[in-house]
Amino acid sequence: MIEVRPADRFDDVAVLLGPKKNPDASVCWCLSHRLDSKTNTSLTGPARGEYVRDLCGRDTAPGVLAYLGPEPVGWAGVAPRRDLPIARSRVVPTVDAQPVWSIFCIRVRPGYRGQGVARELVEGAVGLARDHGAPAVEAVPVDNSAEKVNLTMAFVGFRSLFEQAGFVKVADTTSVAGGFPRIVMRRQLD
């Protein structure tokens, strides 16, 4: 049974997002779409993990984690859209003035894919946003028409995943990931 909880345990977040072999590596840590470019670039090596450690200690978790038993197996980054670089994007439109939250990253560990973890992560991210007063949640997945997507670019999610979770397309974008167009999808909560 998959359980989804707020990502407030740094050690579990590190299992999903941290460097696997070299602790000094400058891996993403799911900061590339959370921080402005200048701040993101300025954080290197262990400073990236320390930034995420700080995020995990705040009142609002930086996302959600999926567990199978005690094992963290999936991550979804979610935050108020206004706090993310996407709010200033020239390629992803702002649909309206609602203070929506945005799911900007989904990651499922190898060996646990194809078991419904991503679907549970989306529901957990929606729940976190709802618990913090969001009127709606958006995502900008690829519209891949069931074609295979390079796993490196799959972190944005797929249209079908979000449709299954009750999201509907609300806008086109000029953004592309893995050769596929991305679309804005939304799930109203109120």
Image: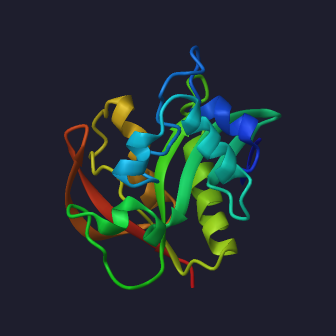
Residue 129 x %, y %: 61, 69
| Residue 62 higher or lower than 43, as above or below | below
Using the rendered view, name the quadrant where residue 128 is placed: bottom right
Residue 157 visible at all: no
Tell which residue pokes out farthest to the front in this image.
42
Numbered marks: total: 0
Residue 132 x %, y %: 66, 74
| Residue 5 higher or lower than 99, as above or below | above
Quadrant of image for the C terminus: bottom right
Using the rendered view, name the quadrant where residue 149 is placed: top left
Residue 182 visible at all: yes
Residue drawn at x 48%, y 75% is 100
Residue drawn at x 43%, y 62% is 84
Residue drawn at x 54%, y 81% is 135
Residue 92 x %, y %: 26, 63
User: Is residue 12 toward the left or the right of residue 165 in the image?
Assistant: right
What is the basis of the colouring in this image?
A: rainbow
Tell which residue pokes out farthest to the right in this image.
70
Using the image as rendered, state which of residue 185 and residue 100 is in the foreground.
100
Residue drawn at x 20%, y 64% is 90
Residue 88 x %, y %: 30, 67
Quadrant of image for the N terminus: top right
User: Is residue 106 toward the left or the right of residue 154 in the image?
Assistant: right
Tell which residue pokes out farthest to the top in this image.
21
User: Is residue 63 toward the left or the right of residue 7 in the image?
Assistant: left
